[in-house]
Amino acid sequence: MAPGPAPPARPIGADAMRLHGCAAAITLALLAAGCSSNASSATAPSTTARRGAQVRTFTVPAAVECGHATSAAVTVDYAISGARRWQVMVDGLPGTTHTTPSGRISVHVHCDGVQHTIALVATDAHGLRTSAVRYLTTRLSSG
């Protein structure tokens, strides 16, 4: 069976105009949705993250002498605000959760002569987190 006659060709300009009209309608619909008069979404504060937990001070020594020990205690000074809880992580491993807004704690690092990551992660009442990271190198005895 032979194919039937081809449908009449439409001018290219007509397809382009229809596509342009659809794009304009979609754009207007998106703009209208973005300019909603719903007061709760229009006035919802985005300042929670800015006013949430903040690390004010986080001091970790650059290095610790280990001698021949396999681990060493490191003193960390901190001050945070707006946090419900926080913890210090050593090399990605979570530590004890704390609630005191400032102070001095001791964390333990493995003595292996390499750099370690010490992170303070603070969480506010809404579950938003902020963090600060410091690096510490353990030094082994040369003898």
Image (tube, rainbow, N blue to C red):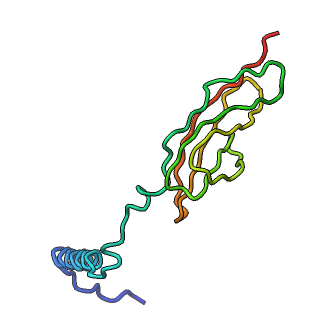
Q: Residue furthest top?
A: 143
Give x and y (percent) for residue 68.
84, 20
Q: Look at the picture and state if 124 lies above or below 71.
A: below
Relative to 53, is 41 on the left or the right? left
The quadrant the N terminus occupies is: bottom left
> Which of the 4 image quadrants contains residue 62?
top right
Give x and y (percent) for residue 4.
33, 89
Please tell me which residue is depicted at 20% across the width and 78% down the height of the picture: 21
The quadrant the C terminus occupies is: top right
Relative to 10, is 130 on the left or the right? right
Considering depth in this image, is 6 or 92 the residue closer to the camera?
A: 92
> Which of the 4 image quadrants contains residue 142?
top right
Relative to 26, is 135 on the left or the right? right
Please tell me which residue is depicted at 67% across the width and 39% down the height of the picture: 105
Considering depth in this image, is 75 or 129 the residue closer to the camera?
A: 75
Q: Look at the picture and state if 86 lies above or below 19.
A: above
Relative to 105, is 132 on the left or the right? left
Give x and y (percent) for residue 84.
57, 59
Q: Look at the picture and state if 43 lies above or below 75.
A: below
Considering depth in this image, is 28 or 6 the residue closer to the camera?
A: 28
Q: Look at the picture and state if 92 lies above or below 42.
A: above
Please tell me which residue is depicted at 49% across the width and 55% down the height of the picture: 82
Q: How many marks?
A: 0
> Which of the 4 image quadrants contains residue 14?
bottom left
Give x and y (percent) for residue 34.
29, 74
